[in-house]
Image: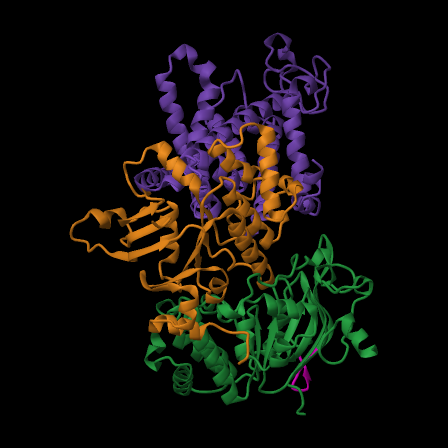
Chain colours: A green, B orange, C purple
Amino acid sequence: MSAPLLSIKDLSVTFESRYGVLRAVDRLSLTMKPGEILGLVGESGAGKSMTGSAIMGLIDPPGQISGGEIWLEGERVDTQPEIFRGPKISMIFQDPLTSLNPLRTIGDQIIETIRRHAKVTNGQATDRAKQVLTDVGIDPARLNDYPHVFSGGMRQRVVIALALVTEPRLIIADEPTTALDVSVQAQILDLLQALCRDRGASVLLITHDMGVIAETTDRVAVLYAGRLIEVGDTRAVLTDPQHPYTRGLVASTPSVDPSLNDEQLYQIPGAMPKLDALPSGCAFHPRCDSATSQCAMEQPQFFGERAACWLLDKKEQS
Amino acid sequence: MSFVRVESVSREFSLSPTWLSRVLPFVESKTLTAVDQVSFEIEKGTTYALVGESGSGKSTLANMVVGLLRPSTGNIYLDGQDLTDPALSLSEKRALRRRIQMVFQSPYASLNPRWRVGAILAEPLHAFSLCPGRAAKESRVAELLEQVGMAASDARKYPHEFSGGQRQRISIARALASEPEIIICDEPTSALDVSVQAQVLNLLKQLQRDQGLTYLFISHDLAVVSTISNRIGVLKHGQLVEQQAAADLFSSPKTDYAKMLLKAAPKVSFS
Amino acid sequence: MRRFLDSDFMYAFRRSPVAIVSFVLVMVLILSAIFAPWIAPTNPFDAGSLNLMNGFTAPLTPNMFTGESFFLGTDDQGRDLFSAILYGLRISLFVGAMAVLFAMTLGVILGLIAGYGGGWLDNFIMRLADIQMTFPSILIAMLIFGVARGILPPELRDEMAITVLILSIGLSEWVPFARTVRGSTLVEKEKEYVAAARLIGLSRWQIMLRHILPNVLSPVLVIATITLALAIIAEATLSFLGVGAPRTEPSLGTLIRVGQDFLFSGEWWILLFPALTLLALALSVNLLGDWLRDTLNPRLK
């Protein structure tokens, strides 16, 4: 097995508020191999974006990383200021408009990013910018266009080009296609997949969409209420989920093929708990139909490599 | 005869920014045709889904059916009565309005944050003079809340005290308050998490079974549509490019556009 | 009440020393204005109780003729300055509050109509606002005040002076209310709860007053507080210029005008204490307004 590209150990992100200390990410451990696409999936409030921001060093007060370590290629990065992570990690956000400066041409913005990270002449940077635009499927002649003349999908391509110019080792894509139409979504995901494969860059794909996970990622990590509850190869997790929450998530996702949908869709009762009112023990136990008294009392650890659930502990014993 | 009949309905929007450019003859006036000659019918007690990407005109069409927008041309009939007839009297309009209600996309913007849930649900009762008397209204509000799987005591709370899924239930309860026959659902689950989306879809289906409701279901998500609709119309740039029974559309789409949409939709199942 | 004390608003209030200090100061000033007749040692406008011998008594020094001592001294007519300030505060606050109430009502209604109605009415109201904004509001107030005095019969002039003052300051301050309310109305009217209200057939006025109004009020509260400070200063300015509150009902501004006559003859207290009171009032109301704005709408920071 190759050395991990990214390794997160016991990461906690907390927020101080008048209701006390809220734990948005709770002792999360994850590793990513070079070149892999890891999906981070969960519903709103699961802490998936917060995890991405923590890796990027973008947690602002009143939030803070209150525990754990983040290592990138054998270097500890959570203690470094954000600037050092810049060239090695890039981020793509949901709304391409907010990551592009509307007052400057896309060429300007790409060239500026190139020259900030490498000592090159203006001409070299322009050539490089044209090359990267071609890579993401945009006519390099549009270098002098402003962001607003592009459609949503094209804009997201520009953002991807911008993320790729520094040749990062890791790209964190936070819901990169949520604001786009399905037809465009498929193109963008294919593009992201192909470009990262070519360059050997890894992608941490943050999304709430199980379909996107299934079609794009190699491995998937499922978050619930700030905790990692299941992780594994995408196919294995989606076809044979071990945690009841993952099982519910997969079952409640409707299929495009009506013959695969039951008359009554599978539903998980209740809703994701708020951070200031987390249930004791396993945070999922009030919504879980196989919960036992133990689930309400003690928070489950990982049993084996797949999932954190007391039911798996019993399976191992028997 | 069909319960709802939409007959070659179009809607244009003026794109000229100011009043001045609209009246000056030498300024070129621009219009956008959001909905272009759309016709379809909905049988009573069934769900007709309109599917399309952003800019397809599906929300404009929904707003016209429910009466929030007037069609530029064309007619919409409910039970044989023309909704777009300018000669309708006020009381006729009111009677028609009571029969058509709507569930909106955003669970946050669709409930007035300053009103208690009880007041939100009682408002249509006041407006349509249903359930006269305070006690009758209160018990009707409690009944509505229970119909959507909530507690009668929730009437005393404010919208912000509920999760997105619960707010969407309240929104459904408000639509049910006037005992409508058709409910227009404009992307009712697109702002919700998957597990909650399933709850809301199941609730809508159950209400349809129990009360014989007719739905016009607007969505961009073919997977969601496949769970609930009997017939599906595919909109593209304001035109209805294809309409079929749901099962047929998924098994044998006729147009390239529908095929592309089906292919692009992300799938969880591994084949 | 318990809900209010436990709210995020009160939590933020308790953690802001500026807010607490300015709130306490404003409350002290308001309460002393309301209870002036009970707090003030004398009634400064009861001509019978005045003793000209007490004129120009310095603060806390016994008068050389009568031996009486006054907390903040007396003016030229032997009027107790402390009492005069309390009564002046009453007039200033009353005029300011009424003017803001008037400006607020007018501005909120016009803003709602412009925002919800749209079209030519919106254009008309907002262009009117634009034109008014090109003049300093004190100039507008003076203009309205002058016109009103010209129309009124002379015998009613003093009687109506306060009312005219309120109307003219109010008319000069409605624009910020209207603009803000129009802006928030444009946002609120696109929200789906308004569509839901239209679907059950509510009239425009019902939707504006029952649904939109409660949702656009929090910025109005902020503007009202800041405008209160402006209105108090506007009133003081008008009275200082001699076109505001009459000498029979002097406000802080009138007192300052009277006081400046004696500044260079050594009777500094006649000017200083009314001026300090006005400063304290305007400053604390302003600070409270700024804090409210930051708390109720963090985006405006």
Q: Residue at x 35, y 47 (%)?
A: B69
Residue B175 image offset from top left, x and y in percent: 50, 45
Q: Is residue A294 above or below residue A56?
A: above
Q: Is residue B55 left or right of residue A59?
A: left
Seen from the viewer's position, the closer of residues A192 and A255 is A255
Q: Residue furthest front?
A: B1
Could you tell whether C13 is left or right of B50 in the image? right
- Give the residue furthest to the bottom: A1
The location of residue B98, given as percent across then percent down, is 44, 39
Q: Is residue C173 visible?
A: no
Residue name at image x 56 percent, y 23 percent: C91
Q: Nearer the viewer, residue B268 or C170?
A: B268
Dominant secondary structure of the magenta stretch?
strand
Asked if residue C25 is among those painted magenta in the image, a careful observer would answer no
> Which residue is more in the foreground, A1 or C279?
A1
Q: Is residue C205 above or below residue A102?
A: above
Please name the residue shown 54% across and 48% down the image: B210
Circle count: 0
What's the magenta region?
A70-77
Image quarter of residue B83: top left
Q: Is residue C81 visible?
A: yes
